[in-house]
């Protein structure tokens, strides 16, 4: 059975492959893609990122952004891999995320 780090590494590899494919299809330069690579360093559009998330959701059959992780907390490939690892591990909640809590409070005030 795979441990959490092995699962995260496998997910990270698939993220890197997906991003490399998108960059290649758009004839954009494929730099040295690593776990610490920030999505903001790449010339990807929000539509490209949405497609990446959609592909990962289809592959892993989970949506970590539904309840577990605030999508705004995902900055690097490693962050995205951690979100999917958390979702696949069956844990119920990510450690305290201040932005997520603030957004929930605002949402509740508008109701």
Image: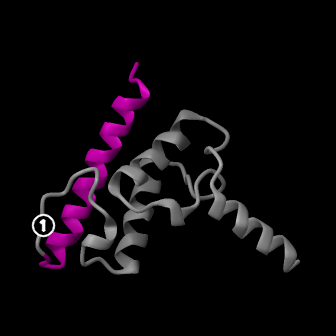
Where is residue 7 drawn, in percent x and y?
38, 34
- 111 is within the stretch colored magenta: no
The extreme front residue here reads 98
Look at the image and tell me in which quarter the C terminus lies. Answer: bottom right
Residue matched to label 1: 30
Relative horizontal placement of residue 79, taking residue 86 as reference (left or right): left
Q: Residue at x 54, y 34 (%)?
A: 89
Q: Residue at x 62, y 36 (%)?
A: 91
Q: Residue at x 41, y 62 (%)?
A: 75
- 25 is within the stretch colored magenta: yes
Where is residue 106 drawn, in percent x and y?
78, 74
Look at the image and tell me in which quarter the N terminus lies. Answer: top left
Where is residue 53 drawn, in percent x and y?
43, 63
Relative horizontal placement of residue 90, taking residue 25 as reference (left or right): right
Q: Quadrant of residue 80?
A: bottom left
Where is residue 6 drawn, in percent x and y?
34, 30
């Amino acid at each position: 059975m795979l441990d959490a780090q092995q699962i995260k590494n496998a997910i990270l590899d698939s993220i890197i492959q997906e991003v490399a494919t998108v960059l290649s299809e758009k004839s954009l330069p494929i730099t040295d893609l690593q776990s610490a690579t920030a999505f903001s360093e790449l010339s990807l559009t929000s539509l490209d990122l949405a497609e990446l998330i959609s592909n990962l959701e289809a592959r892993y059959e989970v949506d970590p952004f539904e309840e577990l992780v605030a999508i705004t907390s995902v900055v690097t490939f490693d962050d995205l891999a951690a979100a999917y690892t958390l979702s696949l591990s069956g844990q119920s909640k990510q450690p305290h995320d201040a932005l997520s809590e603030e957004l929930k409070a605002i949402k509740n005030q508008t109701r």
